[in-house]
Amino acid sequence: MNDTIAAISTALGVGAISIVRVSGNEAVDIVNKITKSKKLKEYESHTIHYDHIVEGDNIIDEVLISIMLAPKTFTREDIIEINCHGGIATTNKVLELLLTNGCRLAEPGEFTKRAFLNGRIDLIEAEGIMDLINSKTEVYRKLAMNQVSGNISKNIKNLRQKILEVLANINVNIDYPEYEDIEQYTIEQMSDTIRYIEKEVRNIIKKSENTQLIKEGITVALIGQPNVGKSSLLNCLLEKEKAIVTDIAGTTRDCVEGTIIIDGIMVNLVDTAGIRKTEDKVENIGVNKSIELIDKANLVLFLVNNNQLLSNEEKELLEKIKDKNYIVVVNKCDLEEKIDLTEIEENAIIRISALNNEGIEQLKAKIKQIFNLDKIETDDLSYLSNARILSLLNQSLEIADEIKISIENNTPIDMLEIDLRNLWETLGNITGDTYEDELIDQLFSQFCLGK
């Protein structure tokens, strides 16, 4: 990390401004070379200055330059941010001049990686930054912000500190065996510490059960035979004409998707091809995709026609979805009722008229009820949305269980120390206090360029 890196930190395109970020020991010297004033070294840290970017005698852009000197910066290195006019050609030219004068093009996520390696943030906070960038709902933003703020990191580090205190007592016991009272004290302290850690870890995992809903949303498949009103329902839920609606069977031949927000959670709606036996090769592909989606969806909205009896194919579909989350949506309730739903639980049925936009709010309320969306707490979002971290927490629970069994079996204290140290290191992998270089490279490669 001895070199100086540069990258465009804003989305490339036409806009009011774009920002080119530079970080490293030579940041001020390199940027100073391409300014008209050549005065950057004279300015104090955390100040903004008007200047021009030049190439020889040619003015490239009129800019504002932010100067932030180490260590009080995001990367804990000198950082310069050049605020350019937001044109593609201009921004690229500024970046080109920086690279020509000694900068290296930053890798994806390298600014955040340097912040981690220089001790500015830990891995939980780094992953929170990535989630914050990708957040699509207010609840997801709060979840990510909680990780960025370090609240979860403090909990994990507190657990590691308690283990460290026990390890210190064990080392005293091994180094000074003449003190007979030390072993009994250490075993008791270890038992209390393991029970406390187990309780805290289980609590974090339990709170994190809903994070996939918060982060990825709910995938809802609209399933049914042709002409039952799947596309009309999609349009009603989205409150716009997303899907083509006609009275011609087989109009929808591929999946049409849209997203709505219910209580801060994304609901990803997928309108599928009408399921029926068909000789049309293209339509048949769509039908097969619809059947496959049933297994992948978190919820199936099975649409049926109020003024028609259930067909054999519809009865087969009901059998297929019986073990999934599903709602039988009876459409066309403005027409005479002919359908027989005596074999279906009334609790699983919602009646609507997509044509008249009736029953849509009741359907949304049913979705909320199935996934307990109104029960997801948003005041204390000390959840984890990362599969890597949740996996490590589960590993920690397994190690804690092994230590408890070892204590009950009167395992020698020096053997207990090995398991306890393993638990300490596993929790350290969560925050990045202990890590492997390959993990760090892979994690930060997922960031966007310039972050």
Image (cartoon, rainbow, N blue to C red):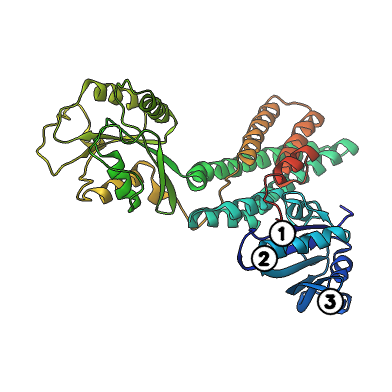
Q: Identity of the amino acid at label 2? A: Ser
x and y percentages locating residue 357 in the rendered image: 23, 51
Q: Is residue 404 left or right of residue 261?
A: right
What crowding class fits label 1: few (fewer than 14 Cα within 10 Å), some (14-19), or many (20 or more)?
many
Q: Mark 3 sits on what residue?
A: 36
Which SS class for mark 3?
Answer: loop
Which amino acid lies under the numbered mark 3 shown in the image of this protein?
Answer: Lys
> Residue at image x 28%, y 43%?
245
| Secondary-structure class at tag 2 | strand
For marks 3 and 2 on the same chain, the one whose residue lies earlier in the sequence: 2
In this rendering, is residue 102 above or below 354? Answer: below
Pointer 2: what residue?
A: 18
For residue 8, the mark is: 1
Which residue appears at 80% of the width and 59% of the height?
96
Three-letter code for the amino acid on which mark 1 is drawn: Ile
Mark 3 neighbour density, 10 Å: few (under 14) some (14–19) many (20 or more): some
Q: Residue furthest front?
A: 58
Q: Is residue 320 above or below residue 354?
A: above
